[in-house]
Amino acid sequence: MEEASVDKMVEQEDTTVLRSTYQFLDTKRRAALDKLLDIKGSIRVFCRIRPFNSVENWRNSFPVSVETDKIKIKSLGSKKEFVVDRAFDQNSTQEDIYKEVEPVIKSAFDGHNVCVLTYGQTGTGKTYTMEGVQRNPGIVLRAMKELFREISQEKCENYTLTMSMLEVYMGCLKDLLAPKQHPLRMDPATKSNISIMSRNNGTVEIEGLTDAEIMNFKQASRLYDKGRRARATSWTNVNETSSRSHCLTRIIIREGEKGKVISKIWLVDLGGSERLLKTGAIGQTLDEGKSINLSLSALGDVIAALKQRKHHVPYRNSKLTQILSDSLGEGSRVVMVVHTSPSEDDLLETICTLTFAKRVRSIESNRELSEETKKIRQKRIAELGHIIEEAEKELQILKMQIEKAESPITEKNQAQFADVSPRSPLVLEQVEFTESSQNTKQILKTLGPKTKPRFMAPTASSQQRQSAAGESIKNLKNSKYGNKRNMNFSGSQSLSVTGPFTSNLKSRSVDQGPRGVSLSSNIPAVRNSLPRHRRRISAC
Ligand code: ADP
Ligand code: MG
């Protein structure tokens, strides 16, 4: 019993220290991420150019050229230049885009509301970037995968994710995940049973919207498919499956089941921004187009007002901006990916799209940074990126360590609980003792020095402390006070062993006992683990 409890303490100490180290590194990583996003700006605009499609004539002169943060347009002898936060050319991949969006998604765990929007003329790849295709998923599925990965990696088992999908169509809201619409419960004026409630504290609630808990990535992607299928489409002569509505996917991170909201992530595939003249739309499709244009210009007004830190932000001018109002403003992280076509035929639309982008990032473009400032900024971004990358690598290793260290403990606890009732205390203690010595060996094997992270290797001074602790254990054992009924170890170890069968132990040397458990110098890894880990905690 006594040695079993020593084992248990050692094991628990191991995982506690690993967990503390994990927490420390994770805090460091998050702080660096926060700084990085602050430097980059809380509202960022990217531009992606779609590759030529099968009907476009790529032999025509290509009017759009791309630099890292610039789009240049040449047309009829004149040149226009648009500055964005990041430009993606025709060869850019879904990974390239997600890589830039990823830090923003991760910042949701730090309590920032996130909003990622795709904007552009119909047929320029908004849905491709947001949804992707089966072989090459877009931002939504990649973000979901990331969120589940973060939750499992951080062992935040008490975080829950819920998902909603909403379509804003001609000013009406449609719940894309609703099991079925209840016509009687719908508001006859808006044909919807969903309403937007803005609270005094600035948060927004969408009443009546399905908010489904998602337990894993597979379930989440099935639900997302369901929502996508429910999205309304109609035909115009711009694109045969043109999206005539805005599609919004919301993920809420909560602490505990239905508990406190940590943050919201909105992933928004906006309706096509083309001017109505170009579509040749009539009737309902014309009305759809007008409605989309109104809400897009309202969105532009809101973002421009936020960027200029205006006192009044006109959220109320459209349903879209009302819904997003708590995820666009202060404390939120916003990314807008504007999309353009490479074709000369779409040049005017491309210019309109880039003018919108310029307006959205108006403050930055009004006062462009000097080359020197840009260099310093880039250097700082690279440094922070490096810190984040290193911390992520270490966290990965620690996660494996924690998993390895914890699995034998769980097995052992289960075995002990299964054995408790039928045995007399004496028999129970003997069985425990034997089992725990096997388990300890197993832990020692898993936690062997080779598997420990680099920074947890003992230094020369910690080795000295360990051998001093070993010495004091030996002295104690040899002294006449070496009674195992109440043992206290000096130095950085403090172990207390009690139990009714200690007389049995008294006659047995701890070094030589057949049960072979680890109070003395025979098994150094257990003896060493406590001082080494304590050192790490104090370093944190
Ligand atoms: P939008 O949503 O803006 O109307 P879509 O996403 O539907 O446009 O894209 C129109 C077509 O172009 C689709 O067939 C899509 O697969 C293709 N497409 C768009 N962007 C890309 C890209 N970057 N790479 C490959 N195909 C693309
Ligand atoms: Mg689309």
Image (spheres, rainbow, N blue to C red):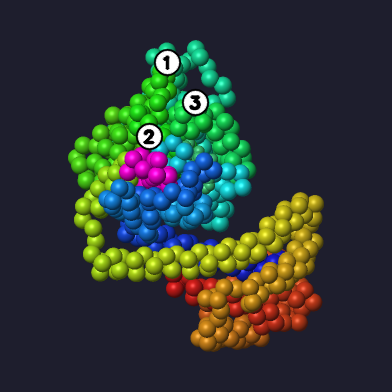
Q: Is residue 283 above or below residue 325?
A: above
In this figure, which residue is indicated by the disc labeled 1? Answer: 187
Distance from label 1 to label 3 (Cα)?
Answer: 24 Å
| Viewport quadrant of the N terminus | bottom right
Q: Residue at x 33, y 51 (%)?
A: 73
| Viewport quadrant of the C terminus | bottom left
Give left or right: position of 1 versus 260: right
Q: Which residues are magenta?
A: 330-351
The first of marks 1 and 3 along the sequence is 1
Distance from label 2 to label 1 (Cα)?
Answer: 31 Å
Q: Secondary structure at mark 1?
A: loop
Q: Image quarter for residue 340? A: top left
Q: Is residue 89 above or below residue 259?
A: below
Q: Are marks 2 and 3 in contact (CB under 8 Å)?
A: no
In this figure, which residue is indicated by the disc labeled 2? Answer: 274
Q: Secondary structure at mark 2?
A: loop
Q: Which mark is residue 102?
A: none
- As shown in the figure, which amino acid type bears the numbered disc 3? Ser
Q: Residue at x 72, y 69 (%)?
A: 442
Q: Are marks 2 and 1 in contact (CB under 8 Å)?
A: no
Give left or right: position of 232 versus 474: left
Give left or right: position of 85 versus 207: left
Q: Which mark is residue 234?
A: 3
Which sits in the foreground, 197 or 293?
293
Q: Is residue 290 magenta?
A: no
The first of marks 2 and 3 along the sequence is 3
